[in-house]
Every structure is written in structure tokens, then in C-alpha cells.
Image (cartoon, rainbow, N blue to C red):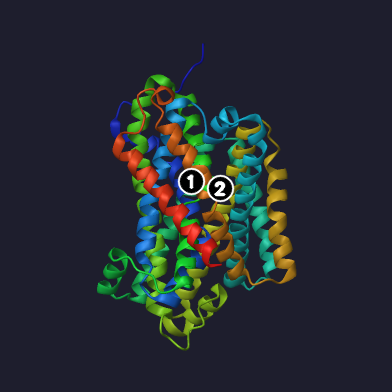
């Protein structure tokens, strides 16, 4: 007979206990890829694409709720469900594409953290990459001891980045009416704006955290027992709502700051993250530039850790095989070291990696909507009709946007 951890008697303490998995997932929504796409969107188009950030974060909240629900209702992660239910011939190709997407994610995250070290402390990118590798290895060691401790550490990083962007908004003074208009009224300005919209979507709705969130919810169910499934599910709604609100605020603030500072400013070379950092000093002051670098560093470190955990879950779920986290960390960071050694434009690499990710969203999202709509599988937690409609509408938007990019390439 398995022994489960008892829940606190207080409902508030219970809700607080289950804050964590969505905060880990939310880090994927504010990784360095978001910095590249949001800053470029704000610099090139002002407040025009703020509505994309709003809708992408609403999609993200829905998707993460579905992912958490799948883990709680079935006791399985999305990756393990696919590994069991796909035809045998399809399992390995599906696993490989998921691994490629996870590695594309890690490129953005790892390089972003290395760039943060460069901007803050003057290290070379290669030195920053080495330091990033050491720190990420150290933090990942927490996962083998206590998953909740790791969730608290990453959640603290998310809150720190959010506080930094409160300060950045105070420094940059975005125009309130323009922010409201850009956030509420959809619009594009040519193919390049659509390309950036796809990048924002790829940077916000992240395939790898769809896999990871379901696995973390499954772990909560195993720890506290199926008898508490309803209580955990209610608390998970708070977890997702709070975490996604914070991530959405950071993304909106990032783009609004770039629009306020860089758009229409001939002296602001902002298409590059490094140039954006350098330009912030004369425009907003040294403190604004330094805390920008700090936010990039923190977001990069946290998200590269999350990316490694997601990759581990993808392998374990699809092919029932695990490798040591240190070995996975070594494998996934190798492309980043190669990119840095070749001297490629890191901002362009970040933007293109996010566009690649946008093409993988549907491959994770379609089975997620199918599984969570299955009444027999979900044991009373199946999606109601309106959630199904929202889920399939999200799939349609993603596929349409990617189809447009392919057709106009």
C-alpha cells in the first residue's frame, strides 16, 4: 500500500502548496527568445504587435491548463501518452521532432544566458556560456533531491524578472493610449510583421513546456494520491492563472519598453539585443541597461534549466529511456557552443529558433486537445464544448500562421 503526503487543512495553504508547476512552465514563456522577438517587434513596429502577445499568452494559459489536467486525470504525461498510443512506427519520428524542438529551445535559452553574462560583466560569449553550463548543472542537481525546491527557485527567478520589468516600465514611460490600442486592435504591416508574429507565438507558446507541465502534474498526483485529485485540480487553476499573468505582464512590458525607447528613434540600433542594451544607457541611464542585462541573465539561466528537464521528460515518455541530467545538459548545450564559436549573429539565431518552434506547437497541441477531450480517458475531466472550440481554434491559428509563412517564403 502506497503512503501519500497529507494535505494541509487550510484551503489557502493547500493552494500555496500547489503553486509551482505552472511557474516552471511560465519561465519558458519569458526566455531569451522572447527578448529577441519582443524587442525586434517593438523596435520595428512600435506597439502594433502587442495584441499578438496578448493572444499568445491567453493561448498559453489554456494550453498549460489542458496539459496540467491531462497529467492529473490520467496519471500520465503527454509524452508517455503519445508513446503508448501512437503506432509503433510513428513513436520514434515523433520523439525525434520533439527532441529537435527542445534543442532549438535550449539554443535560445543557453545563448541568452551567456549574452546576459556578457552584457552585465563584460565576459566573452564563450566565457558566459561556460559559466552558464556550470550554474545550470548545479541548479539541476536540486531536481534529484527535491522537485518542490527546484520549483521554488525557478518561481523566484520568474518573480525577479517581473519586478525588473516593473522598473523598466517606470524608466521607459510607454504611451498608455498606444499600449491599449496595440493590445486590443489586431493588425499587421507586411510579411515581416507576420514573420515576427510567428516568432512571438513560437517564443510564447512553447512545445517543450506542454510536455513538462503534464509530467509535473502527474508527479503531484503520485505524491498526494488520487483521492485528492479534485483539490489538486482546483489549486492548479490558481497556479496557472497567477503564473501566466506574470509571464504575460513581462512579455507585454518587454515589447512596450522596446516600442517606447527604440521605435522611430534613428539613434537606437535595436534590432540586436546587444545594441539594445548599449542604446539603453544614453537613452534611459546605466541602471536601466544593467537591470535589462540582469533580467536576460536570470531568464536565460532559469529557462535553460527548464528546457533540460523537459527534454528528459520527452525522452522518458516517448521511448522509456532516461540518461543522466548532466549528460543531457552536455548534449543539448553543444549546438550553442558551436554557434558561439562560429561567431553567428545571436539575435538572428534567437529569432529564427522561435519561428522553428512555432512549427512544432501544433504537433504537441493537437494530441493534447484530442486526449483531454476523450471522456473515457479523462475520467470526468474531459473538455466541455467551449474548451474544445477554443483548443481547435488555437490549433487553426497556429497552422494558418505557419502556412502563410511557408507560402510567402
Question: Can you tell which quarter of the image residue 171 is in?
Answer: bottom left
Measured from the top left, where is residue 323 in percent x and y? 71, 37
Kindly give the residue lying farthest to the bottom in the view shown: 266
N-term mark: 2 or 1: 1
In the picture shown, does residue 374 fall above or below 283? Answer: above
User: What residue do we see at 42% from left, 33% from top?
Assistant: 372
- Tell me if mark 1 has few (under 14), some (14-19) or many (20+) residues whose alpha carbon lies within 10 angstroms of its own: many
Residue pointed to by mark 1: 24
Residue pointed to by mark 2: 306
User: What residue do we see at 36% from left, 66% from top?
Assistant: 50
Q: Is residue 295 visible?
A: no
In the picture shown, does residue 87 fall above or below 21? Answer: above
| Left or right of 374 in this view: 113 | right
| Residue 375 image label | none
Q: CA distance from mark 2 to mark 1?
A: 7 Å
Query: SS at mark 1?
Result: helix
User: What residue do we see at 50% from left, 30% from top?
Assistant: 219
Check contact, mark 2 vs mark 1: CB within 8 A: yes
Looking at the image, which is closer to me, 228 or 270?
Answer: 270
Measured from the top left, where is residue 289 in percent x and y? 48, 75
Query: SS at mark 2?
Result: helix
| Left or right of 86 in this view: 265 | left
Amino acid at each position: 500500500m502506497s503512503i501519500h503526503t497529507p494535505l494541509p487543512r487550510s484551503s489557502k495553504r493547500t493552494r500555496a502548496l500547489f503553486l509551482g508547476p505552472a511557474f516552471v512552465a511560465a519561465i519558458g514563456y519569458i526566455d531569451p527568445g522572447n527578448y529577441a522577438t519582443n524587442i525586434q517587434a517593438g523596435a520595428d513596429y512600435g506597439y502594433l504587435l502587442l495584441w499578438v502577445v496578448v493572444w499568445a499568452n491567453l493561448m498559453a494559459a489554456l494550453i498549460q491548463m489542458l496539459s496540467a489536467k491531462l497529467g492529473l486525470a490520467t496519471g500520465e504525461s503527454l509524452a508517455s501518452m503519445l508513446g503508448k498510443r501512437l503506432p509503433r512506427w510513428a513513436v520514434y519520428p515523433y520523439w525525434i521532432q520533439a527532441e529537435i524542438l527542445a534543442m532549438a529551445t535550449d539554443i535560445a535559452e543557453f545563448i541568452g544566458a551567456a549574452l546576459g553574462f556578457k552584457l552585465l560583466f563584460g565576459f566573452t560569449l564563450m566565457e558566459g556560456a561556460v559559466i552558464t553550463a556550470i550554474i545550470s548543472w548545479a541548479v539541476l542537481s536540486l531536481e534529484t533531491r527535491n522537485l518542490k525546491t527546484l520549483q521554488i527557485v525557478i518561481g523566484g527567478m520568474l518573480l525577479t524578472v517581473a519586478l525588473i520589468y516593473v522598473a523598466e516600465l517606470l524608466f521607459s514611460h510607454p504611451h498608455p493610449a498606444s499600449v491599449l490600442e496595440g493590445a486590443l486592435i489586431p493588425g499587421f504591416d507586411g510579411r515581416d510583421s507576420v514573420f515576427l508574429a510567428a516568432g512571438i507565438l513560437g517564443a510564447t507558446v512553447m512545445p517543450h513546456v506542454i510536455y513538462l507541465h503534464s509530467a509535473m502534474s502527474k508527479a503531484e498526483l503520485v505524491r498526494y494520491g488520487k483521492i485528492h485529485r479534485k483539490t489538486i485540480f482546483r489549486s492548479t487553476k490558481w497556479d496557472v492563472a497567477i503564473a501566466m499573468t506574470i509571464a504575460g505582464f513581462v512579455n507585454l512590458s518587454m515589447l512596450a519598453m522596446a516600442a517606447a525607447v527604440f521605435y522611430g528613434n534613428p539613434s537606437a540600433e535595436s534590432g540586436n539585443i546587444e545594441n539594445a542594451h548599449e542604446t539603453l544607457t544614453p537613452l534611459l541611464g546605466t541602471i536601466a541597461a544593467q537591470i535589462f542585462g540582469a533580467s536576460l541573465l536570470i531568464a536565460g539561466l532559469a529557462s535553460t534549466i527548464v528546457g533540460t528537464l523537459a527534454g528528459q521528460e520527452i525522452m522518458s515518455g516517448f521511448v522509456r529511456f532516461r540518461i543522466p541530467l548532466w549528460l543531457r545538459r552536455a548534449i543539448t548545450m553543444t549546438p550553442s557552443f558551436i554557434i558561439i564559436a562560429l561567431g553567428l549573429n545571436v539575435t538572428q539565431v534567437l529569432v529564427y529558433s522561435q519561428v522553428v518552434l512555432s512549427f512544432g506547437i501544433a504537433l504537441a497541441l493537437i494530441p493534447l486537445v484530442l486526449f483531454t477531450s476523450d471522456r473515457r480517458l479523462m475520467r470526468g475531466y474531459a473538455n466541455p464544448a467551449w474548451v474544445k472550440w477554443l483548443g481547435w481554434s488555437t490549433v487553426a491559428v497556429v497552422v494558418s500562421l505557419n502556412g502563410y509563412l511557408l507560402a510567402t517564403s
